[in-house]
Image (cartoon, rainbow, N blue to C red):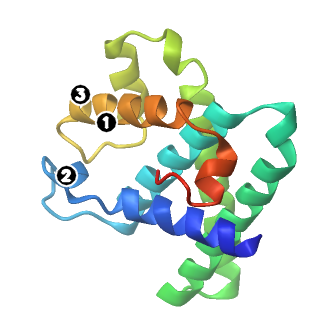
């Protein structure tokens, strides 16, 4: 099962490093935080789309696995134990804020969607491109099951 989660995590990382997402970047240089926010937004859409009683255990396991992988990545960057706990708390709080903001995504206008994404992606000029991108991502998720993504039958 961990292999399924690792493949899923790696697919999210691959999506996050999609160069087209960074085409209209304000600073011309992205940061770990920018990439992390894109990763968390992708993951939030996954949780939103597949939230159901039958997926509850798998989503919790996936959540735990992804944040454990993020913690390992932070350790690789070189943060110490004390700062890792603080960073992880900040990242988890940020993730829950993202989940809260996109909860009613389907009912939002395009302008409202732009405002929601702008809260987390302030270094991106072309927010309307990202709104379209994440709407396409959400629609793609809705056409498959969580298991198909976990078993790598479908690529996210």
* Residue 60 vertical position relative to residue 138 in the rendered view, above or below: below
Secondary structure of residue under mark 2 = helix
Q: Residue at x 13, y 51 (%)?
A: 23
Could you say which disc has been placed on residue 20 in the image? 2
Residue 151: percent from left, percent from top:
64, 60
Q: In 3D space, how far apart are the residues under numbered discs 3 and 2 (Cα atoms)? A: 13 Å
Q: Which residue is mark 1?
A: 133
Q: Are there few (<14), some (14-19), or many (20+) residues within 10 Å of tag 2?
A: few
Which residue is more in the foreground, 79 or 68? 68
Q: Are the residues tagged 1 and 2 within 8 Å (C-beta)?
A: yes
Residue 73 at x, y percent in the picture: 55, 79
Which residue position is annotated with label 3? 128
How many other residues sit within 10 Å of disc 3, few (<14), some (14-19) or many (≥20)? some
The answer to whether residue 78 is visible is no
Mark 3 and mark 2 lie on one chain; the one further toward the N terminus is 2
Question: Given this view, does label 3 or label 2 mark the residue nearer the observer?
Answer: 2
SS at circle 3: helix
Q: CA distance from mark 3 to mark 1?
A: 9 Å
Residue pictured at 19% horizontal, 52% vertical: 20
Quadrant in the rendering for residue 65: bottom right
Image quadrant in which you'd find residue 142 = top right
| Residue 134: quarter of image | top left
In the depicted structure, whether residue 104 falls above or below residue 11? above
Can you tell which of label 3 and label 1 is closer to the viewer?
Answer: 1
> From mark 1 to mark 2, how far is it between C-alphas?
10 Å
């Amino acid at each position: 099962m961990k292999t399924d989660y690792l493949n899923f995590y790696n697919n999210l990382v691959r999506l996050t490093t999609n160069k087209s997402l960074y085409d209209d970047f304000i600073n011309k240089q992205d940061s770990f935080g920018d990439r992390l926010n894109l990763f968390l937004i992708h993951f939030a859409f996954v949780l939103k789309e597949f939230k159901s009683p039958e997926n509850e255990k798998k989503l919790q396991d996936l959540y735990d696995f992804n944040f454990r992988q993020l913690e390992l990545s932070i350790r690789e960057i070189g943060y110490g134990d004390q700062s890792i706990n603080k960073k992880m708390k900040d990242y988890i709080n940020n993730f829950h804020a993202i989940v809260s903001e996109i909860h009613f995504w389907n009912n939002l206008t395009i302008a409202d969607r732009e405002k929601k994404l702008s809260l987390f992606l302030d270094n991106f000029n072309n927010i309307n491109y990202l709104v379209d991108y994440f709407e396409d991502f959400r629609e793609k998720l809705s056409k498959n099951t969580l298991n198909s993504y976990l078993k790598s039958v479908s690529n996210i």
